[in-house]
Amino acid sequence: MTKKYFLQMAGYNIWANNLVEDWVSRISLDQWETPIVSSFGSIAATILHITGAEKVWLDRLNYADPIGWLPTEFKGSREELLATWSHASAGLKQFLENFDEARMMENISFKRINGDAYLMPYYQVFAHVFNHSTFHRGQVVTLLRQVGFTDVGSTDLLGFYRLKN
């Protein structure tokens, strides 16, 4: 996997996140917080999880200290959460733009949320981050429909490629 590929994935991630951010910004706060049987229990909690994951990986990649876990710390508004999500997504792309492709197979060391030390190659981190967000964005589309918001479209990678060609 190449830097060029992961830069495309970072661009796709921003594009798809922007679509979802637009949709969730148009629902009511009741819809945002409605309890729904799912992985995280609401649209708000699912977006918080995606944002937290993108942010924690960006912090790990930049060797930030300390690294917090947003889902246990965040107390802000929906707008603040969406701004944090946009910032993290843009930061991941910027990290990749400045990343030396020769290091793709090197391990990055970090601590997991539970404090355990861990190593994994950069390319696996990049693949995981973008795949993780894609998985949970799909859940958000279903959650939006369950709360009555049907003005959703596709966040599929093919749609991104069609727009870029």
Image (tube, rainbow, N blue to C red):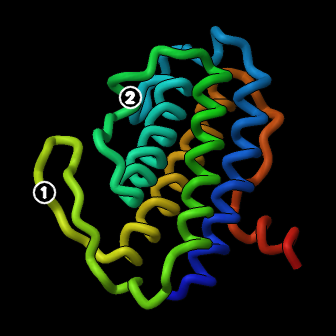
> Whole-percent x and y of residue 135?
50, 53
Q: Is residue 147 left or right of residue 50?
A: right
Q: Quadrant of residue 92?
A: bottom right
Asked if 74 appears above or below 7 in the picture, the reply is above
* Residue shown at the point (78%, 32%) measured from the top left: 150
Mark 1: which secondary structure?
strand
Extreme residue in the top direction: 30
The residue lying toward the viewer, choosing from 1 and 35, is: 1
| Viewer-side label of 2, 1 | 1
Mark 2: which secondary structure?
helix
According to the picture, the residue beneath numbered tag 2 turns out to be 71
According to the picture, the residue beneath numbered tag 1 turns out to be 117
Q: Is residue 64 left or right of residue 113?
A: right
Q: N-terminal of the two: label 2 or label 1?
A: 2
The residue lying toward the viewer, choosing from 135 and 64, is: 64
> Whole-percent x and y of residue 1?
49, 87
